[in-house]
Amino acid sequence: MDSITLYNADAYDKIFDFINNGVKVDHIITDPPYNISKKNNFHTMNKPRYGIDFGLWDNGTFDLFQWIPQYSKILSKNGSMIIFCSYRFISYIVDILEMDGVNMEVKDIIVWQKTNPMPRNINRRYVQDMEFAIWAVKKNAKWVFNKPYGVSYLRSKFETPLVSGKEKLGHPTQKSLNLMKKLISIHTDENQIILDPFMGSGSTGDAALTLNRKFIGIEKDEKYFDIAYNRLINYDIPNILGAYDYDNR
């Protein structure tokens, strides 16, 4: 398998191709829609934003859970998942992962603490400066955990700023490249295959390829797929072009 393959497709459909073709991956690291978008005009702010409205893809119609049992079928025997999610749904996703037949075991909840969180009405609410990810491994797996040499122990909290400047590519919930590199360096090994079924702007793929991992990315939205494609094209042009089929979107 070459280093990168991208699909402009629905992850809920693509999984059946993977299963039928015997595809296996080592890790699934993904940031699916959170289903938390809502409109709300913040009149008290100097430059008000209109709620937490990320677009139609996050409007509450996305199935947050049922992709997990299907994608667990293509994980290698020592495989793992890292799934970003809203705090509202942590327990639900944990229940799905540990459901009979899914064959996963939750190891930890990872915290991403933003050093420059989005503003809120600070007189009425706590600043929302954290997001969460669930780390789970296959049952009885010899899972990967690369603790850096010379570090006594690792905390499950990672502090990075929100994406800004040249790194920001137009996706409203784009994850920090620095964050994704830290997670991938700890939870995966070189030359392993990382799959992101909800690729967005390609941060997981960028981090994976930078760290000498192989990457499979799926993104349903054509706009964001194009962003990821243009971001990642220089890593392995022939194989990306092979998967990027304008006639079969």
Image: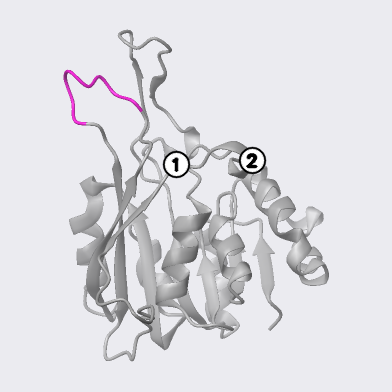
Q: Which residue is mark 2?
A: 166
Three-letter residue code for mark 2: Lys
173 relative position to 153: left or right: right
**Location of residue 1 in the rendering, given as x and y in whole percent from the top left corner:** 68, 84
**Location of residue 120 in the rendering, given as x and y in whole percent from the top left corner:** 29, 24
Residue 8: image quadrant is bottom right
Say which of 6 and 213 sits in front: 213
Numbered range of the magenta stretch: 119-126
Q: Is residue 241 a member of the stretch shown in magenta? A: no
Q: CA distance from mark 1 to mark 2?
A: 12 Å
| Residue at figure coordinates x 40%, y 35% from the top left | 59
**Location of residue 58 in the rendering, given as x and y in whole percent from the top left corner:** 43, 39
Residue 162: mark: 1
Residue 37: image quadrant is top left
Q: Secondary structure at mark 2?
A: helix
Q: Secondary structure at mark 1?
A: loop
Secondary structure mostly seen in the magenta stretch:
loop
**Location of residue 76 in the rendering, given as x and y in whole percent from the top left corner:** 44, 86
Three-letter residue code for mark 1: Leu
The reply to whether callout 1 and callout 2 are in contact (CB within 8 Å) is no
121 relative position to 146: left or right: left
Residue 60: mark: none
